[in-house]
Image (cartoon, grey):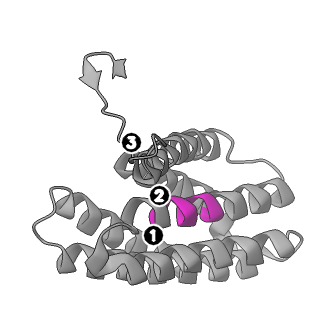
Amino acid sequence: IKITGVTFEILEDPLGQVSLIWVLGWVSVIGGIALVVLGVWLLTNLFESVTVLAWLIGISLIVAGVVEILALHSVREVAAAAWISGGLLVAAGIVVLVWPDATLWAIAVVAGIGLILAGVLRIVVALADRDHADMPWQLGLGGLSVALGAIVLAWPDQTLVVLAVLLGIRAIGSGLVA
C-alpha cells in the first residue's frame, strides 16, 4: 500500500491472512487520529454543558487507554505496564461515564488520578526501553500527563474549562504519539 510517498508492507502469515500486528498498528493510527479530533473538539467547545463534557472526558480517557494498550502492548519488556496504564485510563473513563451528573470535583479527581497514574507508568515504560526511537516523546508525554493530572487535582472546583483544555492537550499529544 502506498500513501503519499510512504510504503506500508502488508505482512502475511503462511495461510495468507493479514498480520494481527499490521491490523493493530492501523487501529492504533485510527485511534490516534480520533484522539486528535476529540482533543481539538474539547479545546474549541470549552463552555458546553457539564454532562456533555463528562461524556467527552470519559470517552477521551477510554480511547486514550485503548490506544495506549495498542501502541505499547507488543514491546515485550513493557507489555504488562502498557496494559495496566491503559486499563487505568479506561477505568477512569468508565467511572466518569457512570457518574455524568457528578460534581466537577468528582470528575476532576477521577480524571486527575487517572492521568497521574497513566503518566507515571508511561515514564516507567519509556525509561525501561531507552533504546526505542520515540523514548523522548513517551517520556515527555508521561511527564505531561503527570503534570496535567496534578493541575486538575490542584484546582478541582475551577476544572470545567481547565479540564477540557488539559484533556484536549493530552488527547492531541497521545494521538500524535500513537
- Residue found at x 31% / y 72%: 143
Q: Which mark is residue 170?
A: 2
Residue 135 in the image, given as x and y percentages of width and height: 19, 63
Name the residue furthest left.
131
Q: Tag 3: residue type?
A: Glu
- Residue 148: image tag: 1
Per the model, the C-alpha gap separating discs 1 and 3 is 41 Å
Residue stretch in magenta: 61-68
**Image quarter in which the N terminus is found:** top left
Asked where in the image residue 62 lies, by quadrant, the reply is bottom right
Q: Is residue 104 above or below residue 17?
A: below
Badge 3: residue crowd in 10 Å (few <14, some 14–19, many ≥20): few
* Image quarter of residue 106: bottom right
Q: Residue at x 54, y 47 (%)?
A: 31
Q: Residues within 10 Å of mark 2 (few under 14, many from 20)?
A: many
Labels 2 & 1 near each other (Cβ < 8 A): yes
Name the residue at 74% across, 73% down.
Answer: 94
Which residue is denoted by mark 3 in the rendering?
Answer: 12
